[in-house]
Image (spheres, coloured by chain):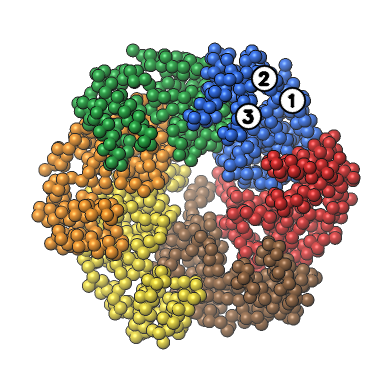
Chain colours: A red, B brown, C blue, D yellow, E green, F orange
Amino acid sequence: MSNDTYYAGGTEVRLFEQAFHRRVPVMLTGPTGCGKTRLVEHMGTLLGRPVVTISCHDDLTSSDLVGRFTVTGGDVVWTDGPLTRAVKTGAICYLDEVVEARHDSLAILHSLTDHRRALYLDRAGEVVHAPDEFMLVCSYNPAYRSSLKELKPSFRQRFATLPMGYLPSDREAEVVVAETGIELAAAHRLVQCANAIRTADAAFHFEPPSTRVLVTAAQLITAGASELDAAEACILAPLSTDGAITEGLREVAAASLL
Amino acid sequence: MSNDTYYAGGTEVRLFEQAFHRRVPVMLTGPTGCGKTRLVEHMGTLLGRPVVTISCHDDLTSSDLVGRFTVTGGDVVWTDGPLTRAVKTGAICYLDEVVEARHDSLAILHSLTDHRRALYLDRAGEVVHAPDEFMLVCSYNPAYRSSLKELKPSFRQRFATLPMGYLPSDREAEVVVAETGIELAAAHRLVQCANAIRTADAAFHFEPPSTRVLVTAAQLITAGASELDAAEACILAPLSTDGAITEGLREVAAASLL
Amino acid sequence: MSNDTYYAGGTEVRLFEQAFHRRVPVMLTGPTGCGKTRLVEHMGTLLGRPVVTISCHDDLTSSDLVGRFTVTGGDVVWTDGPLTRAVKTGAICYLDEVVEARHDSLAILHSLTDHRRALYLDRAGEVVHAPDEFMLVCSYNPAYRSSLKELKPSFRQRFATLPMGYLPSDREAEVVVAETGIELAAAHRLVQCANAIRTADAAFHFEPPSTRVLVTAAQLITAGASELDAAEACILAPLSTDGAITEGLREVAAASLL
Amino acid sequence: MSNDTYYAGGTEVRLFEQAFHRRVPVMLTGPTGCGKTRLVEHMGTLLGRPVVTISCHDDLTSSDLVGRFTVTGGDVVWTDGPLTRAVKTGAICYLDEVVEARHDSLAILHSLTDHRRALYLDRAGEVVHAPDEFMLVCSYNPAYRSSLKELKPSFRQRFATLPMGYLPSDREAEVVVAETGIELAAAHRLVQCANAIRTADAAFHFEPPSTRVLVTAAQLITAGASELDAAEACILAPLSTDGAITEGLREVAAASLL
Amino acid sequence: MSNDTYYAGGTEVRLFEQAFHRRVPVMLTGPTGCGKTRLVEHMGTLLGRPVVTISCHDDLTSSDLVGRFTVTGGDVVWTDGPLTRAVKTGAICYLDEVVEARHDSLAILHSLTDHRRALYLDRAGEVVHAPDEFMLVCSYNPAYRSSLKELKPSFRQRFATLPMGYLPSDREAEVVVAETGIELAAAHRLVQCANAIRTADAAFHFEPPSTRVLVTAAQLITAGASELDAAEACILAPLSTDGAITEGLREVAAASLL
Amino acid sequence: MSNDTYYAGGTEVRLFEQAFHRRVPVMLTGPTGCGKTRLVEHMGTLLGRPVVTISCHDDLTSSDLVGRFTVTGGDVVWTDGPLTRAVKTGAICYLDEVVEARHDSLAILHSLTDHRRALYLDRAGEVVHAPDEFMLVCSYNPAYRSSLKELKPSFRQRFATLPMGYLPSDREAEVVVAETGIELAAAHRLVQCANAIRTADAAFHFEPPSTRVLVTAAQLITAGASELDAAEACILAPLSTDGAITEGLREVAAASLL
């Protein structure tokens, strides 16, 4: 069974494909671990394009994206960065958690995301025109509302935005089985446990458990851990370090698990 | 049909041309995506001058503008930056979103924007006098009122300021058709949808949808997406991540679209 | 007697081992000096893997983790950092006090802690795939609640979290004896003194005394210091510089010690 | 007609000249565009000294002023900065908007502005004694009262301060004619318009229009723009982006212009 | 008479020696100038170990402590920093005012101050194991309560803490005589003056006068200054620049001095 | 007539000399332009020692003080900074406005200002012992009470502090005559004017006029300026940019001057 199955029903695959064919950049939004990275990898396979992934962070400079001069054998030579390589090879370039990047680093994307579709390497004195196959994809998690950093509206308007959420329960359980080889019934219990906590989320204001933590818990269970121990380590403990909250969540979890 | 058509009726083309002939620098102001970059490219064609575009950002140093010493084959040589190249070749140099630049980087522009019309390359020990054909154009979006950064009055007074707004509805629909090949009727519906949201803007305090997002939505529609799906991804989703607001906007959009 | 004895009863050794075999990264949490570093060293011995320890701090760059270009004999060569070396040799890489690290440095860990299990060395243009034996372990102390820095939920969800606490009294006394050769009775008095202060902790809001300070105090005692002098120097003085509080703690300590 | 005419009546030319002959540094103060730069150039001509202008900004280091070591052909050689060159050649060195400079950069001026009249190049291990012809001139705009940066009193006391204001109306109109070739009557209308806005300034708290913007407006008028269009672009638009204020100013302007 | 005399009665010499023999790092605390540096030098003599002193400050990097790569004759070679040299030679390494250091620089000390007793030179790819003779000593002044910087509890718990205070009056007078050759009676008057101000300290909230300032005052007296002039310059003037407070202190001082 | 005359009556010359002979560092305090720099130069002449002056500022690094490695002819060589040169040659090293320096730069002075009298060049791996002739002198203006920066008490206690004030009127007038050749009567009027403003200072809270501004005003008067014009430019204008205050000061000044 290939990963392709999981996305066949959603509109995101179709809209992503349409954006690709019309050279429209795409912005994926949604909670942690809901499958944004996997969707990009899936689309790379589907569209026959390599995927270049860049994890964004505070200290990512535009040189880290486009390249820099380096010294080799006494001479100074230009070395392309991952974005430049992606443009030149017509890859899908995926900027994960783009909201974390310094905004000045994002300015280099302006000319790539409008009608120019070109990368201006001012320091190298070169302009790289993107082939039709090149596609830029970014992602961020809008739930971090308290963050000091926000993407500028003018930046968001450069993308077709595809909001993503958690998978439906049955599908999520299937993913957990496929990733870990756990029994389907146990996978269903883990999903049920996650959904109970996700529902309680509005009251607690923490980041709800992702599909990823269910996979991690299932890994420990298949290695011999009890369901409660695994859920404690992988689902509950990362949510909060406040003893009272953890106690409450433990009761919620215990109601679902063996 | 050339881009020239779209600007024939406004005063901005005429004032821009007069400023060019009297060597007066120009400041373009207006909302995101209203066509500032396109106007500069249009004027470059009209006046027969190349356009050098520089996207401003927090980390743009004056060296990025004027050039720097680099090491080649063991020797240190000066390499002109894009502004210096623009001055030397008599180009139109366009500093996009100039308010984003560090103010110290802008000091280098002082001698270019008064009667001296010269670039002082202090580090290279050189003075570059601008030919008559050289023109400096800057832009910014005054709607970001909450921004901590503001252009100094003494800087703004160095430019003739041309405020720009959205195109009239008919013209905007024509642009969308010309860019994407969408049917005129669908383009009109997209413009109507955008205008409805722009009117609601005062209440919601977000950056209103630009012509650019209408073009993006039209791209998806011509690729087979429904008008509502395309508007959801390209017009509504970038506006806000607040569920209640998005719900309200969706009703506004649905009233205009098929 | 080996260190292995001390952990045989807890669940942390078993869960750590299960995580290792299923390639799940582990996050250790707990108060200062409760034995997190020792557990990692113990597990390295148990699993037959070398341990590479990295103390995190504000100024740790991703280059310090993965490596950098350095100049040797006129040429520029890439030198692996400790994380890269750990990945290549299939070691247990232990990031101590990970919450202290700059978050941008942590972004490099994303691809190592999901299904990719790979290190992307963007600057060297290389991808290092982790062998099955490689394991990432991080630790932090959640009691620093007032800290401005917090691990992002999406980061915490990448790990199985094992909370650790103080050892039971008898076991803690055995550790103190094994480390210092102090008499068992004196070790028990030191543990009793520590427990009395730990209980008073809720009122005083300081970091409670760790097993480490008991070992240090026992070192001075075996060198000839009185129990009260040693406790004063190693247990009480580091807790607070407020004279009144220290006075109160001295009475608590005097009740347990000779 | 030479520029010399415009300043013949003021005391600033005479005091500037006296300061030059007694080797007293001069500080020019006054609103944006009132002619500080022009006065310095005028005095350079009058006193037969070259003028070296340095635009100050946040990022100007003392190395940018005095010079630095650079690598040429494998050797490290000292290269004088503009201030050092000005001292060595006995020029008038003009630091424009000195309040913008980092204060640490200004410390290098201390020994130049007291009885020592010498520049200490600590890094080059050299002392440069200023010839009698060398003069230091600085300027700033005291109207930026809200600025976080202020010149230290001990720094201001090192200079003879010459406050400058707008030219008298007739003289200002003459300057506009001389610079642009506009008709005298139109120049008078522009000056009248500016004076009306300058009078309204106390209420609006913006930087009032300078002689420079009148020259810019006159440039557009001589190129064919209407007086109102030119005033809108060059005088009103730079003042404020608040629609209501601009509306009010437009009425004030319309009362003066054709 | 040797310095050894002064410390013979306190517990600090004995505890310091016990810590040295059991390889426990020591933290000295106490007011400015109470003799922390002297105690370390005294212990170095007593224990027969060289002392390497490092004054901590905001800008001390871990490279300043452990070493760095430098370029010599075209090659890049590693140069040990003072901490590394101290470890290799089995010296007493004294970090003066450790609270002033950047906390990230202190992380390098973790592995030196627990059971590992090793210095990890990540950049040089080397581990230096401390010989038994190596000892780490730090100091700070807890009276700077208003300081933004505080040592982390987990850091303080790594040390045996020895609090130090002023010497008893007779002993302090002896120190002043031994250092300066002043008459004993005058030394007693200076100590009496200092004690009067130290007692008034609670009301004035300034750093009380140290033994060091008494020595400095005695130096001026032996050079011919009057006791009041010397006390004014060395004891009173450094305490406060507030005229009223200084006036009050002068009366306090005059009551003790000739 | 030599400068020596002016200080013969004060205690500062005598205390400075006593401090020099007992190797005690000196801190000069007092208002701007009261003659601190001149006193140091005077003492250099009197004691037969060269004076090395360093103007402190925010960006002064310890490398700027002690020296750094530089590249010459392909090799890396150490170059002494001004402080190191001063120590080696037994000069008087004068740190002007020491409060402006970064505190980390001042840490290098600790070992020079206590019983060690040595400079530790950690990076060069060298210890420079100060000869008896070496003397460290610092200065700052305590009137900047609002400053965020303050010297630490432990730093101030390392110096004998000599507070300086304005010269008596007759002496100040003599200085003005000696520096400029102005008539004695006019010099007295300038001093009278300054004293009137200094008296009004408490109400206005500005930095009072220094002897330096009287000298500057006298320079313009001897060049032909009227007393009022010279006082306006050199005494009043630097004090305040507030029109109302300047008006009030002008009346005060007019009462003293011709």
Q: Nearer the viewer, mark 1 or mark 2?
A: 2
Amino acid at the residue labelled 3: Thr
Q: Do the residues bearing badges 1 and 3 touch, measured as CB atoms within 8 Å?
A: no
Query: Is label 1 on the same chain as label 3?
Result: yes
Q: Nearer the viewer, mark 1 or mark 3?
A: 3
Image spot of residue C161 (x, y percent): 73, 38
- Dot 3 falls on a residue whose secondary structure is helix
Q: Residue at x 75, y 69 (%)?
A: B230
Q: Chain of mark 2?
A: C
* Of the pair D29 and F151, the residue shown nearer to us: F151
Residue beneath disc 1: C7
Amino acid at the residue labelled 1: Tyr
* Of the pair D124 and F212, the residue shown nearer to us: F212
Q: CA distance from mark 1 to mark 2?
A: 14 Å
Residue beneath disc 3: C199
Q: Quadrant of the C terminus of chain C?
A: top right
Q: Residue at x 19, y 54 (%)?
A: F196
Q: Is residue F200 visible?
A: yes
Which quadrant of the figure has residue C223?
A: top right
- For marks 2 and 3, the one nearer the N-term is 2
Image spot of residue B246 (x, y percent): 70, 66
Q: Quadrant of the N terminus of chain C?
A: top right
